[in-house]
Image: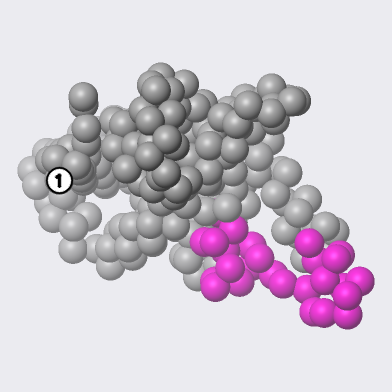
Amino acid sequence: GFFETDIFGGNPSFVGLDQYRDTITSSSFRNSLWVTLKFVLLTVPTGLALGLGLALLAHQRLRGMAFYRTVFSSTVATSVAVASLMFISLLSPSVGLINQALRASGRDPIFFLQSPGWALLSIAAVTVWQNLGIVFIVTSAGLQSLPEDLYESARLDGASTWSRFVDITVPLLSPTLLFGFVVLTITSFQTFGQVDLLTGGGPLDSTNLIVFSIFETAFRDFDPGSAAAQAVVLFFIVLLLTAAQFKILERRVFYG
């Protein structure tokens, strides 16, 4: 980031903080940061809530639940490329299953990946689905460690299902939820494959996340110095955000 070089890293020229200043003041970088923040807000709470909900469902002692646990955790073994191709088959305006169903019902197709209003939501849906497996596994492990006698005592005292969830499950599961929240945030800031395969940062830069912007700066604009500066800025953004999460949220975490 302190040197201006050619695409192969040759002919270095020391430029000090110039590339960092250009990165911070760049309108394209600020747009990428804003899009990434919206993406994080779309994916992290949704992914954590869905993963927790599925873990609570799978925690029920019902016949055949082992099969559903396998299904719910299966996305952890799915690569970004496979997940993206699966969603192309769902969201394509011509052959996508969703648009075929819309046409069959007499409605106009929706251009999920070609519309600025839908593209970021579509990328977020792919990311939430792919991360669902790891969130489910982590929260399921946390639920397995909770003492059953507390729930039995609450039932004897007449506590409702919602009261048991709010007053017992959430406090005791708070370390696991904090871990999932932090990991999902870092993962969302590092998202690249879905954007590259599905939208290429478009339309109109509506899905131009920071890591994809770094990739384009390095390999499309042939400017590795500026790309390195953007990567360092992204590192400090994630570092500060993670530290803030621990500082603020850890006060509500119960380690009893």
Give left or right: position of 200 versus 180.
Answer: right
For image coordinates 54% across by 50% down, the residue present is 195
**Residue 11: percent from the left, percent from the top?**
24, 33
> Which of 78/23 is in front?
78
User: Quadrant of the image for the C terminus?
Assistant: top left
Asked which quadrant contains residue 171, the reply is top left
- Which residue is the extreme one toward the right? 104
* Helix, strand or loop under label 1: helix
Give neighbour class at mark 1: few <14, some 14-19, many 20+ (Cα, 10 Å): few
Q: In the image shown, does 235 or 71 lie closer to the viewer?
A: 71
Q: Is residue 115 above or below residue 208?
A: below
Q: Is residue 216 above or below residue 186?
A: below
In the image, is residue 113 part of the stretch drawn in magenta? yes
Residue at point 57%, 53% (across, down): 125
Q: Which residues are magenta?
A: 98-123
Report x, y in % for residue 4: 21, 41
- Asked where in the image residue 172 lies, by quadrant, the reply is top left
> Where does the image place residue 97, in percent across and percent down from the top left?
82, 57
User: Which of 56/231 is in front?
Assistant: 56
One can see residue 101 in this view = yes
Check the image and tell me how it is coloured.
one colour
- Name the amino acid, label 1: Ile
The answer to whether residue 236 of the structure is visible from this angle is: no
**What residue sits 28% from the left and 63% below the top?**
30
Assess whether residue 42 is covered by the magenta stretch.
no
In the image, what residue occupies the spot 63% across and 26% down? 61
Judging by the rendered image, the residue that carries numbered circle 1 is 248
**Left-right relation of 55 to 37:** right
Question: x, y (%) of residue 169?
Answer: 38, 36
